[in-house]
Amino acid sequence: MGRVVLSHPEKALFPADGITKADLADYYAAVAQTMLPHVRNRPLNLWRWNAGIERQRVVQQEIPKGAPEWVARIAVPRRRGGTVTHAMANDADTLRWLAQVNCITPHVWTSRADRLDRPDRMIFDLDPPDEGADFDHIREGALAIGDLLRELGREPYAMTSGSRGIHVVAPLRRTAVHDAVRERAREIAEELAGRHPDRLTTEWRKAKREGRILIDTARNTYAQTTVAPYAVRARPGAPVATPLRWEELEDVRLRADSFTVESLPERLERGGDPWAAIGHG
């Protein structure tokens, strides 16, 4: 960690909770060994709160000016010409540097630098209709996605988003382009919504959801990003996007923000990484 000196380590990024930039950096150092396999060699979008979570957010694709030379990066062609150079979090020093630039929540591509056009993840984001939605319905929706994916010969993995919902992820072999993966994810989501029309929907317009949970498959689009596993969310209590053991979805006490920067390191020390077998090759 000697390569990154924090400026203003006392800056309160979560003022109501007393969580500082130094605390954020310490958290990412504590989880680095577990987190890095899930983010390494993936282009990042940086979600930064330069004045703390109660102020304005900046979403940044281009690596910030003045980034250390040792931070890994990749120039990605834009569809309309030119390139955007993304940072990649390939080591623990870079995770600490993300905290230094007030990046509370790194988001990652579903593909990796060596084959940007071939995703290795299919993402289903269960998005509740409002903040007060019954989280039991979201858990049940995730379990139903898992059942359908297994019917289709795919192994599901689940993660609390740290915000409001649950992500269900199916690892891929990197044989199909993003458009094909997104289309297949849409077909799976529509099949599932057809089986559970009272609880689940693929309807984007909130007026047409009628209180049902959206199965969002848009994260499977080329150059779209999803919250990184073990990333901190800019919400009260500093909850973390947390990979789960599948059976934890059966726990009625589970919530999207069940795990925080305070509790997550101990969880990993006690039980290890539930996604250790997801595959990164």
Image: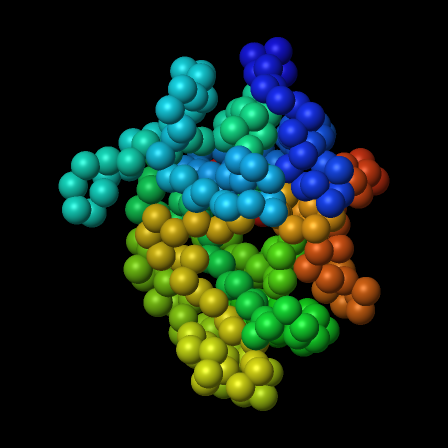
Q: Position of residue 66 (x, y in %)?
A: 40, 19
Of 109 and 22, nearer the camera is 22
Judge from the rendering whether residue 255 lies leftward or rightward of residue 277; answer left or right. Answer: right
Scheme by which the image is coloured: rainbow
Of 99 and 42, nearer the camera is 99
Q: Residue at x 60, y 72 (%)?
A: 130
Judge from the rendering whether residue 104 lies leftward or rightward of residue 224; answer left or right. Answer: right
Q: Position of residue 68 (x, y in %)?
A: 44, 17
Q: Residue at x 76, y 62 (%)?
A: 254
Seen in the picture, residue 143 relative to 163 is either above or below; the reply is below
State which quarter of the image contains the N terminus.
top right
**How many marks do you count on the picture?**
0
* Quarter where residue 60 is shown: top left
Residue at the far left in the pictured view: 81
Q: Is residue 252 visible?
A: yes
Q: Position of residue 54 (x, y in %)?
A: 60, 47
Judge from the rendering whether residue 102 lies leftward or rightward of residue 71; answer left or right. Answer: right
Judge from the rendering whether residue 79 lies leftward or rightward of residue 243; answer left or right. Answer: left
Q: Is residue 196 visible?
A: no
Q: Residue at x 66, y 23 (%)?
A: 9
Q: Position of residue 98 (x, y in %)?
A: 54, 30
Of 148 and 9, nearer the camera is 9
* Quarter where residue 82 is shown: top left
Q: Residue at x 68, y 59 (%)?
A: 256
